Amino acid sequence: MDMKLLVTGAHGLLGRSLLEPDFDAEMIGCGRGETPVGRGTYHPIELTDPQVVFALLDRVRPDWVIHTAALTDVDRCEIDRPLALQINLEIVRHLASACLQLGLGLVQLSTDYVFDGRNGPYGEQDPTNPLSYYGALKLQSEGVVLQEGLKGLVLRTLWLYGYLPGTRRNLVTWPLEALARGEQLRVVDDQWGNPTHVHDVAQALVELCRRQVQGLFHLGGATYLTRYQLTQELARFFGLDPGLVQPISTVAAGQQAPRPLRSGLRTQALESLLHSAPLRLSQGLEQLAGQESFRRDFSTLF
């Protein structure tokens, strides 16, 4: 193993998707929880403390820090702005400062919410215009990581899905749970994006670090559709009733934070660099359905 990677947010879906597979690298996790996760060592840490952050990075000396920890509840970010600022920007500043001083690489995960959703899907060169506080903080965090002198990489992604036991529900698992119980769902039919399999993101991150790539890239799945269409596709794929899914507009949904509507990310730059394409939704669902832990915990679907 010729590369050492430190992953923040170790207990989240992306964090665990980086730490639990057998990548050809030394993978080290850190997070707020005390329970170890992953195949390698794990360090409990409070990322809001810059001195603690520097001490850990100085001790571990990873080649790259992959920062997956974030407050991704967009509505909560809109309501509790001090908390959102602390988690989604101040922590990034702590990490960037430590990485700059120690000569380490820093990877920041960002989002399509840096765009206003008028003309998606978007490429890396398209102008940003975030509508929400979450999107604004993520855009600011990109600038912190891409500052001159820091070995920085920003990967924008969106609509992440997959399954690992104990992780929070996502845009695939929560509708499946509800549909399996025969519940009716109201899902917005005017928000567009490309669902992205978490393992595509994990594999891309490891490979980008291995190649010492810097700069800004997009990664989104190969299927472009609305959230309503996505939920219907889920129902059909798993033999559930798509009639349980009812369309609703974003305005009628009354969400706290404004959303980009015609969003989505173009991934040609990353595909060209890595010589691989992200999964289509059908391929991602096939992988999910073949996963032992998913089949066990969603046994009613099989």
Image (cartoon, helix red, strand yellow):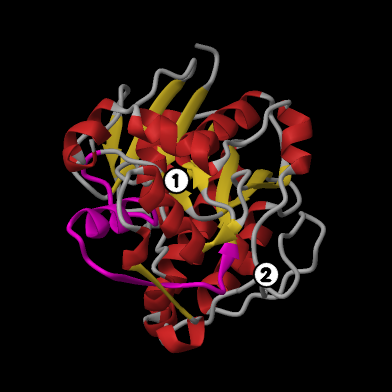
**Residue segment shown in magenta:** 165-192
Q: Is residue 160 magenta?
A: no
Badge 2 marks a residue whose secondary structure is loop
Determine the residue positioned at 70% across, 46% down.
Answer: 217
Tell which circle, 1 or 2, labels the residue nearer the N-terminal end: 1
Determine the residue positioned at 24% across, 60% down.
Answer: 178
Amino acid marked by disc 2: Phe
Inspect this view and state whether residue 57 appears: no
- Judge by depth and name the residue closer to the eye, 302 or 142: 302
Task: Specify the label residue 54 is tagged with.
Answer: 1
Q: Where is residue 184 in the image (x, y as percent from the top left)?
A: 27, 69
**Spatial separation of the CA atoms under disc 1 and disc 2:** 32 Å
Task: Specify the label residue 118 is tagged with.
Answer: none
Q: Position of residue 197 (x, y in %)?
A: 49, 41
Q: In which quarter of the image is residue 151?
A: top right
Determine the residue positioned at 67% across, 69% down.
Answer: 115
Q: Quadrant of residue 190?
A: bottom right
Determine the residue positioned at 31% across, 51% down.
Answer: 173
Badge 1 marks a residue whose secondary structure is helix
In the image: residue 148, left or right of residue 197: right
Label 2 crowd (10 A; few <14 / some 14-19 / many >=20)? many
Q: Position of residue 209 (x, y in %)?
A: 61, 30
- Judge by depth and name the residue closer to the eye, 20 or 277: 277
Amino acid marked by disc 1: Phe
Q: Quadrant of the C terminus?
A: top left
Task: Specify the label residue 115 is tagged with.
Answer: 2
Inspect this view and state whether residue 93 appears: yes
Q: Is residue 169 above or below residue 10?
A: below
